[in-house]
Image: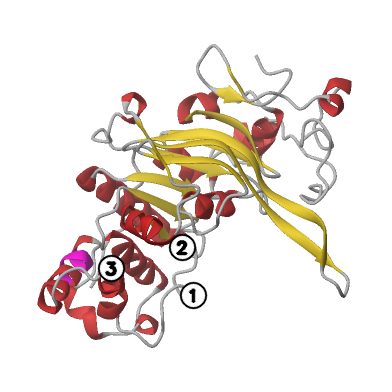
Amino acid sequence: MTLDAPTIERSAEAPAAGHARPLVEVEGLALHFPVYQGLLRRQVGSVKAVDGLTFDIRRGETLGLVGESGCGKSTTGRTLLRLYKPTTGAIRFEGRDIAALEGEALRAMRPRMQMIFQDPQACLNPRMTVGAIVAEPLVEHGLMKPAERRERVRELLDAVGLNPEYVNRYAHEFSGGQRQRIGIARALALDPDFIVCDEPIAALDVSIQAQVVNLLQDLQRKLGLTYLFISHDLSMVRYIANRVAVMYLGKMMELADVDDLFRAPKHPYTRALLSAVPVPDPVVESTRQRILLKGDIPSPVNPPSGCRFRTRCPWAAEICAREEPAWRTLEDGRKVACHFAE
């Protein structure tokens, strides 16, 4: 089955997410992993993977989540889906706090929240056929009769651009892009409202990335989906996201509409990230100023006092070490954690 490579375009039919009510609301979310040492396995500290996040995701929107490796992006996404139990904080899904749910109450919420993983090769069982992989969520939740499940699987494969006749093939018989489509079909099996896309294009060839991103946008329009799109690729985030959140060392630095953030970033870390994005104009690229950050990212076990970013920030002052900047809303509506952002 051949597919024409589409161009990446921001669709005019995208939902007006800016005026929608929040589907997911996060308040003070933290996840700390204990660190043990010695023969007695005594806890000597904790890795502050996620440390006090407050934000929301509006119904029908795509919220992009960006930042360096190890900053807590994937952990945040998995915590929102309750694959991890948060240390503290609230996760409200349609107004219901799911942070402390357990057992059958949590299981009942699972169909409404799904995930698309980064590596389609690693997340597909090589011993199962494509039909069994896509049908697995339906079987797990005891939904539909066998004949109905088979028909549902064929519909899902067709929806993601795969031949329904492929149901009896195995994952190794497909290309990387096709395997990611299988992962998307599996995520859609239970008709979710919210999907965490954990770097869904990072393991794909550049020529295939545009096809997968456009497929996600088409499905969002047709099914009214809400995405948290985690990615290192700022250029791709700029096209698919309605708003963008920037993370650093477990903290959120800035959250703004995608056009506002790329046009005029307020946080020094956001400026440094955007300065690393190549510009497809040789004249502009040769003259623009890059912001080079010095030093390594501090350890999440022992983060710096005050502002997490101050040890690498070109504009750090004494107050940055003394006081942690508040997560505040500026006049233009964006949120930022910086003493000097105005």
Amino acid identity at mark 2: Phe
- Examine the rendered structure and indicate whether residue 147 appears above or below residue 273: below
**Left or right for 228, reference 145:** right
In the depicted view, which residue is nearer to us: 32 or 313? 32
**Rendered image: mark on residue 117:** 2
Residue 325: percent from left, percent from top: 72, 24
Residue density around tag 1, few if under 14, some if 14–19, many if 20 or more, within 10 Å? few
Residue positioned 44% across, 70% down in the render: 120
Real-space CA distance between mark 3 and mark 2, rounded to the nearest whole angstrom: 20 Å
**Left or right for 269, reference 223:** right
Picture quarter with the C terminus: top right
**Rendered image: mark on residue 154:** none
Q: Quadrant of residue 322?
A: top right
Magenta segment boundaries in residue numbering: 154-158
* Element type where label 1 sits in the image: loop
- Examine the rendered structure and indicate whether residue 152 appears above or below residue 304: below
Residue 282 visible to an observer of this rendering: no
Tell me if label 3 and label 1 are in contact, CB under 8 Å: no
Residue 6: percent from left, percent from top: 30, 52
Real-space CA distance between mark 3 and mark 1, rounded to the nearest whole angstrom: 23 Å
**Which residue carries the number 3 mark?**
141
- Specify the color scheme: secondary structure
Q: Tell me if residue 157 is in the magenta stretch.
A: yes
Residue 172: percent from left, percent from top: 39, 83
**Which residue carries the number 1 mark?**
122
Amino acid identity at mark 3: His
Residue 290: percent from left, percent from top: 72, 35
The first of marks 1 and 2 along the sequence is: 2
Amino acid identity at mark 1: Ala
Between label 3 and label 2, give the one nearer the viewer: 3
Q: Tell me if residue 210 is in the magenta stretch.
A: no
Q: Quadrant of residue 47?
A: bottom right
